[in-house]
Amino acid sequence: MALGAVSSSFSTTDCSYTCILSGQIDKLLAKLVRDRGHLTAKLAVVVIQAEHDPARAAHLGHEAHGAATQTSSARIRRELRTLDGELCHRWPDHADAKAFHEALATV
């Protein structure tokens, strides 16, 4: 599967996707804010779908949200809306999911 194509169905053995995306993010220069933000947002979606970890996904979402705000990237915002939908649907009462939803709603 290509890095840009993230499947909507993952098994528990698909943690390699999170490893691949994390590795790609680590290799990017800090000054590449938009690229780092986009990959971080994609990673957050993969984390929520593959690892079912709302706290980690929300944390990554907050990081990507900062990049989206800084760069005005519609592509990052699209990924963040996907993440928000997943968090709200699966974990509507989770504190981190609520905080992420509120942060995203204020923009």
Image: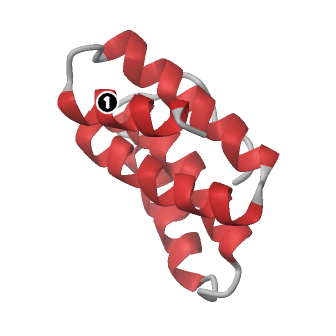
Q: Amino acid at mark 1?
A: Ala
User: Mark 1 Cα within 10 Å, few/some/many (few <14, many 20+)?
Assistant: many
Q: In the picture provided, is 4 more to the left or to the right than 37?
A: right
Q: In the picture provided, is 68 more to the left or to the right than 18?
A: right
Q: Position of residue 77 (x, y in %)?
A: 68, 42
Note whether residue 53 is visible: no
Quadrant assignment for the N terminus: top right
Colour scheme in the image?
secondary structure
Vertical order, 6 against 42 (above or below): above
Q: Position of residue 20 (x, y in %)?
A: 52, 62
Number of residue marks: 1
Q: SS at mark 1?
A: helix
What residue sits 51% from the left and 19% below the top? 85
Quadrant assignment for the C terminus: top right
Vertical order, 84 against 99 (above or below): above
What residue sits 46% from the left and 60% below the top? 63
What residue is shown with label 1? 97
Q: In the picture provided, is 102 more to the left or to the right than 70?
A: left
Note whether residue 34 is visible: yes
Q: Position of residue 106 (x, y in %)?
A: 53, 36
Vertical order, 33 against 97 (above or below): below
Vertical order, 29 against 37 (above or below): below
Towards the viewer: 52 or 2: 52
What residue sits 43% from the left and 52% below the top? 62
Towards the viewer: 87 or 3: 87
Q: Position of residue 79 (x, y in %)?
A: 65, 38
What residue sits 78% from the left and 53% below the top? 73
